[in-house]
Amino acid sequence: MITEARRKQIVEMVEKEGVVNVQNLAEFFNVSIYTIRRDLTDLENKGKLKKIHGGAEKVEKTKWISTLEEGNEEAVSHKKAIAKKAAEYVVDGDTILLMGSMISLFMIPHIKNLYITVVTNSLDVAKELSSSSSIDIILIGGRVKNIKGNILGSRAMKEVYNFNFDKAFLPCAGVHHRVGITTSTIDTSDFLKAAINCSRQNIIICDYRKIGRITFSKVCGFESIHTIITDQEANSDELELISKHKIHIDMVKL
């Protein structure tokens, strides 16, 4: 394996596991521990990880915002599995909130034949739902605040408070047992707070990369969250700690 490919895989392992061990990496890649140490030094200099005694750990960045391309391409199979499971929570007669996210978009094929009302702040979600004859679609008004086509800001927040949802499907950037639910921007955090206050059942939808992560703006603790739907690659130790908050964790297999 060439050096760059090995280092890329090391970064992926650190992101998934949180901490990696030099000896284990050397055995896994069939190289010397000195080679692995050089790899870790190079990756630390590039800000990809943080070296610790005997290995390396993930670098937490509070201002973590994926680009549109990254959002569309990363963890696609995980997001589809989560979306399919999330759709099972929706039944005829529901009024739900679907915020803008790839998981929300992947939910649409599974709910398009239900007789429900969907409130959304996403131009893309509204467009995809428009072909369904059984769904009543309400698009929240306001300012389109980001490249992902999500409507955020004070006007959107005020409009959310006019509704009551049976279920809100909520994307986020981080779920941590000590901090709670976080996201990368204040606008998104404010919108999430408003949505949570208007929903009977709040369901976090996030892939494994968000579990154990702390990002910039806190949304809430776990007292307002009923369920977290994530995938089997999420950090099991972190999920166990989260579950102590009496949160139902629905973990899907890929």
Image: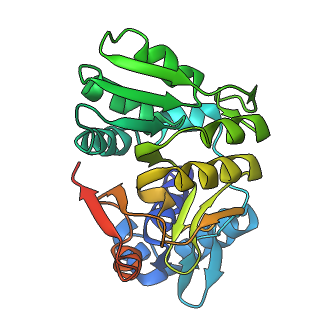
The foreground one among 208 and 108 is: 108
At a point 46% along the width and 76% down the height, the residue shown is 32
* Left or right of residue 123, residue 92 in this image: left
At a point 48% along the width and 66% down the height, the residue shown is 224
* Left or right of residue 231, residue 172 in this image: right
* Left or right of residue 221, residue 112 in this image: left
* Left or right of residue 37, residue 147 in this image: right
At a point 29% along the width and 15% down the height, the residue shown is 134
In the figure, 237 relative to 102: above or below? below
- Coordinates of residue 151 in the picture (x, y in percent): 68, 31
In the figure, 121 relative to 188: above or below? above
Indicate the quadrant where residue 92 lies.
top left
At a point 76% along the width and 32% down the height, the residue shown is 145
In the figure, 196 relative to 59: above or below? above
Circle count: 0
For the question of whether residue 1 can be seen, the reply is: no
- Coordinates of residue 223 in the picture (x, y in percent): 48, 73
Q: How is the image coloured?
A: rainbow
Which residue ends up furthest to the bottom in the rendered image? Answer: 53
The foreground one among 21 and 78 is: 78
- Coordinates of residue 24 in the picture (x, y in percent): 39, 79
For the question of whether residue 252 can be seen, the reply is: yes
- Coordinates of residue 218 in the picture (x, y in percent): 67, 65
Indicate the quadrant where residue 130 lies.
top left
